[in-house]
Each structure stands twice: as structure tokens, then as C-alpha cells.
Amino acid sequence: MPLPPLPLRRLVLAPAVVLLGFVLLSILPLWLLITLAAMSMVPGRLRLPRVLWMMIFYILWDAAALLAMLGLWLASGFGWRIRSPRFQRAHYALTGAFLHVLFNQARWVLRLRIRTVGDGSSAGFLRDPNPPERPLIVACRHAGPGDSFILVHTLINRAHRETRIVLKDTLQWDPAIDVMLNRLPSRFIAPAPPTGPARNDRLADQVGQLARGLDGDDAFVIFPEGGNFTPDRRLRRIDRLREDGASALADRASAMRNVMAPRTGGLFAALDAAPDADVVFVGHTGLDRMVTVADIWRELPMDKQIVMHGWHVRAEDVPTTDQARRRWLYDWFATIDDWIDENRPLEGGP
């Protein structure tokens, strides 16, 4: 379904979510009674009431975020100073606060835990309380629902970084994400669009523009796979490499079972635009079996731990030519692939 135009999203979609939030809030005691009744009548792990509660909470969360952003818009002079440094900081603080609330709720209702690990400075971007000195380009594996939320939550609330992110334009169906990320530095990319050199160059230019001017507390977030991992997408990506005459890269991609062949244009454009930025590669496990809607339903309630591993590469150790960068990028995705094999939760485990 095509994304509605901006006026429709602002004048219809966003107010509808706020109105729905008020309706749900007015009958919240009834929803609580229904949830408690379901919990007493439904055996097992209480999948239905827990999922029902998270759906209600998310709508209320979205509506509250929209009202908070309306307040910032009014305070900025009806949007006049909305992109000033002061209001950009206010939006990052608001994003961090709302993500903190959302993940506290997920921790309680879905028993979701997030653990970060790394070698030496690789964990620093997640846990270091001191002000960072260098900008970061964060290249993350993309697999499972909500991994972009988890990464941004970690970067803002635990690493104290201001994020710039490249993501799919379909996320603008969510009014709170739509409003917030169109006020902060972001680029929305259309999924599965027509391909071709001209279009790829245009997208790379957009990503490069977003990466320009990164400072010491910024983190530029990109998912080089270009979409959530699925077995079919992985095979199609390998076939596309062979069609393009990149047999060696196709062979390397075939050897990686847990990740898709990374696309190079956006990441390389970011590296060119921010040559002084360190790079952090991020892998994660815990969402691997959640590919289809049926998978998500089967896995909920989650009762699981998301493990994130970061590998830190200093700016001076990043190759400067495209050919060397391509080998370097595939080497790192092979490292992520191996780490996933070694750390994947057992079937039936947490």
C-alpha cells in the first residue's frame, strides 16, 4: 500500500491516533478488567492478554508522543525554530524518554532483556558514560521486528549519542515515528523500488548528505542489508550479485547463512562524507526466528534476551578505496555471521 501524502498523514492519520488514544484511555478500566479476566481464563503463557496490553499501550504511547511533539512545535513558535539546536536537543531528549518508557513496558510485559557485549572499546559505544570524542557510523545487522528501535534506544539512552538514521519510508505509517524523524536528521528510503545506476547514485548522495557534519556525540545508523533478513531475500541478493557479474562476492555471500550480502552504496557514501568517523559493526541474536507474522505470534510472549555485540573500527583503519572497502565490509559481515552461529539461542530456549 503506497504511503499517504504528508498533508493526509498530518491532518488525518496523526489526529486519528490521538483520538483513538483518548478513547482507549477513557475505557482503560474496562480493558484492564478484560485483560485480568483473560489472564485467569487462558492457560499457558498468557500470550493473548499480554499482546493485547502491548497493543493498547503502544497506541497510548504513540498518542502521548504526538501531543508532546505538538507542545514542542508550539513552543518553537509554530515550527519557526523547530530545527534550531535547542529544539533538536529537546527532540532527542524526548525520543530517549519515550523509548525508555516503551522498553520498560516491554521488559515487564514481554520479559524482554537487552544485553550488550563487546571486546575492549567495542562495547564503549553502548556503555561508556563519558562524553565520546569521535562520531560513529553504526552498521547493523537487520533481522527481526524492532531491532532498529532497540539499537536507537541503546545509542540514545546508554551511549548518549544523537542519532541520524537511514530507514524504510513505510515506517512513516506510524505517526509518532513520522513526525519525530522528519524533524530530526533522517532519510526515508522506499522499499524494493526500481533499481539502476542513476537511482543508486541518487540514494547514495542522499545518504552522504545525511552523514556530513557529524560531530563527537553523533551516531549515524545504517543497515547495509537494506531490509530485514529472510531466507528468500538472502537467495535473491546472491542471484542479483551473480547477474551483475560479481561471482566472487556471490560466493562469499553464499557462505554466510545468517546475514544477507551487504549493499555498499549507502555505507560507502557515509564513509566518504565523514572520513573522521569510527565505524561500529553490530550483530544481535534473539529475534532470529521472528520472520513472518506467524513466527512473531508463536514466539510471543517473548521471555527472551536480545544480545548485541559491537565491533569497533578506528577511522584510520577503514580502507579508502571501494575495492578494499568491499572486501573489508564482507569480512566484517562474515564475522557477524560466525558470531551469530556461536551465540544463537537454542530452539525452545530463551
Image (tube, rainbow, N blue to C red):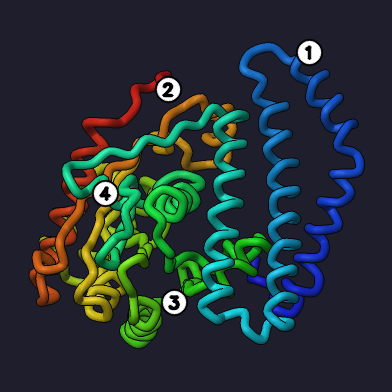
Determine whether label 3 and label 2 are within 8 Å by CB: no
Q: Position of residue 320 (x, y in %)?
A: 11, 75
Determine whether label 3 and label 1 are within 8 Å by CB: no
C-alpha separation, residue under disc 3 versus residue under disc 2: 40 Å
**How crowded is the residue under tag 4: few (<14 C-alpha within 10 Å), some, or many (20+)?**
many
Kindly identify the amino acid type of the residue bearing the numbered disc 1. Answer: Met
- Secondary-structure class at tag 1: helix
Q: Tell me if residue 323 comes above or below residue 212 in the rendering.
A: above
- Would you name the residue on which mark 1 appears? 41
- Would you name the residue on which mark 3 appears? 194
Left or right, 90 with reference to 54: left
Q: Earlier in the sequence, mark 4 or mark 2?
A: 4
**From the viewer's perspective, is the residue at label 4 or at label 3 nearer?**
4
Q: Tell me if residue 140 comes above or below residue 306 in the rendering.
A: below
Q: Earlier in the sequence, mark 1 or mark 4?
A: 1
Q: Nearer the viewer, residue 254 or 184?
A: 184
Quadrant position of the N terminus in the picture:
bottom right
Kindly identify the amino acid type of the residue bearing the numbered disc 2. Answer: Pro
Kindly identify the amino acid type of the residue bearing the numbered disc 4. Answer: Gly
Q: Tell me if residue 196 comes above or below residue 180 in the rendering.
A: below
Q: Position of residue 17 (x, y in %)?
A: 78, 58
- Would you name the residue on which mark 2 appears? 350
- Secondary-structure class at tag 3: loop
Instruction: Please tell me the numbered disc located at residue 124.
Output: 4
C-alpha separation, residue under disc 4 versus residue under disc 3: 39 Å
